[in-house]
Amino acid sequence: MILSWMITPGDGFAAVIRFLFIAGTLRNESLTNSGRMRIYINNKPAETAATTLDGLAQEMNLPGRGVAMALGTQMVQRALWAETALKEGDSVIIIKAACGG
């Protein structure tokens, strides 16, 4: 959808802000309608259809052992992943155990 907005000399800055807000709202609605949300995984932008940490782990095919997840700055126990909801803009840190030297 293309938005057009005519700004007259009296409209000024408020009209520009209103236009940007409307455009941002439409962009967010289309993202929500697609069933995917934007989050950050290990500080990199990503999109997911998962609504919980458990769903994210399944979507990413993470192994059943040797993986830890943090939501924001809080580590989340694996037993709580299924009930830990994700929301737009969340930051998830995934740590995988590695062997070797």
Image: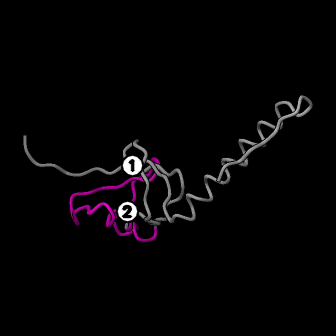
Secondary structure at numbered mark 2: helix
- Range drawn in magenta: 55-83
Q: Residue at x 45, y 70 (%)?
A: 83
Q: How many marks?
A: 2
- Here the colouring is one colour
Q: Residue furthest left?
A: 101
In-front residue for pair 45/94: 45
Q: Which mark is residue 96?
A: none
Residue 24 among magenta residues: no
Dot 2 and dot 1 residues touching (CB under 8 Å) = yes
Q: Which residue is mark 2?
A: 56
Instruction: Name which residue type carries label 2.
Output: Leu
Q: Which residue is mark 1?
A: 41
Q: Residue at x 57, y 62 (%)?
A: 32
On the image, the x and y values in percent for residue 80 come to 40, 68
Quarter-wise, where is residue 28 in the image? bottom right
